[in-house]
Image (cartoon, grey):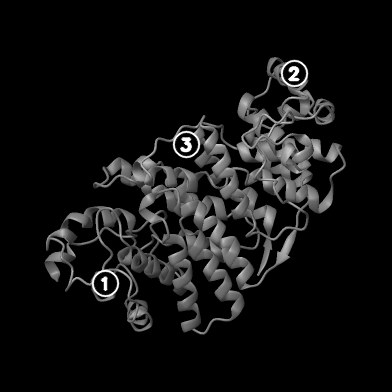
Amino acid sequence: MKICLNDILFALSFALDSVEHELLGVSTNHGKRAALLATAVGSRMGLSGDSLTDLACCAILHDNALTEYIQARELASQNTNAQDPELDRVHCTLGENNITLLPWRSNITNVILYHHENADGSGPFGKNWQETPVMAQLVRLGDVIDARFNLDHVDSYKYQLVRDFLKSMSGVIFTREMGEAAAEVLTEDFLKSLNSGSLDQLISKTVPSRTEDLGLEEVRKIALLFARITDYKSTFTSSHSMGVAQKSEVMARHYGWDDEKTTRFFFAGALHDIGKLIVSNDILEKPARLTNEEFAMMQNHAFYTYVILRKINGMNDITAWASHHHEKLDGSGYPFGMQGSQLSHEERLLTCIDVYQALREDRPYKQGFSHQKSIEIMSSMARDGQIDGKIVDDMNDVFRNDTGGSDSAQDPRNPESFRGAESRIAEDLPFRAKDNAREN
């Protein structure tokens, strides 16, 4: 499967920025601006080709592990403080581990780990400029300048503030050599060009593009990275995306698809919920039924998946499979209200896999259902014209020995537990469920 790595990362930066904005309050398009600032200065200091591309990608991914760290803190019942130095140390360590999943052409060791270090050694790990990779220093420069000054809008006054900051922080946050290079290339015109309307064009001209021809195992690693970023956004769905991806691969093999199509379908499964990064955790983690307004905001995640993925060249099929996983055959799905005649077998299949995976998973408002109970619910949906009954039958055959979830016959829960959980399940799944508890 051919993948343009920086193309994917820049497209997904919108989602990554949304996480940073919600958790840390940084401006939108922060990752793209940090990348452009870092590469502009890096180019002036002699970086080029693959090194420049890898630098841009590292800048996009500099806070890739924030969702993992925040969830770990919440599960440990600790308060999350954006100013806590431990946040920098732990999320940098997790982020460094995550980026080893990507294919790199230059040495990016410790770039994410030390991207909060200062030249004078006053950062969270106490590393000075001699102990910190130049790429890490450049990511630090791009990150801190945009986070501090919000370069989405720049006038002459803000430009002067940036220049004063570069002068005062040379030898403190970054080396004097880097400060001098930044002062040369970060002109007023350049900073003014970093507004949201021109970023994509500027990136395409500035950052060398690189396409990799990757096999399933390599794509699996990339998918795992973005599934982690997506799933750790909420404690409700800590393994949902990879569960969908893995079952997508199993069903693709069942239908006899070749390796290329299987890989692409696996990737779609891993990325199908990437739009949830745009949705507030207050909605994602609400244990009760969502209000109509909240449900409408939840529905937006499928559209955001479409918005994010459609920017990636050569992924039209993956975009359709992933972003249409909440459409229904009777036209009552979202975000586009498509009819069954408009939905391909692959789109119908990913919808069914998503439903099955969600039913099988434990959630705070329900225990995972057994395979038999999940298929019963899905068969009811098929009879109502919502999902493809033939695919449900196929999944019943393929996954009948799946031992995950709970067996309702042996489940000590209150018999009314499904009734209580159903309203919330309906918001997580691509349908508004009927009261299956009454039918079974």
**Residue occupying image coordinates x 35% and y 84%:** 397
Classify 14 as above or below 422: above
User: Which quarter of the rendering shows the N terminus?
Assistant: bottom right
Q: Residues within 10 Å of mark 3 (few under 14, many from 20)?
A: some
Residue marked by disc 3: 22
Q: Secondary structure at mark 3?
A: helix
Residue marked by disc 2: 168
User: Which quarter of the rendering shows the C terminus?
Assistant: bottom left
**Residue occupying image coordinates x 41% and y 60%:** 240
Q: Residues within 10 Å of mark 1 (few under 14, many from 20)?
A: many
Classify 432 as above or below 143: below
Give the number of callouts.
3
Q: Position of residue 197 (x, y in %)?
A: 64, 36
Left or right, 375 with respect to 408, comes to: right
Q: Position of residue 430 (x, y in %)?
A: 34, 60
Give me the C-alpha separation between circle 1 and circle 3: 36 Å
| Three-letter amino acid code of the residue under disc 2 | Ser
Residue marked by disc 1: 370
Looking at the image, can residue 236 be seen? yes
Classify 219 as above or below 92: below
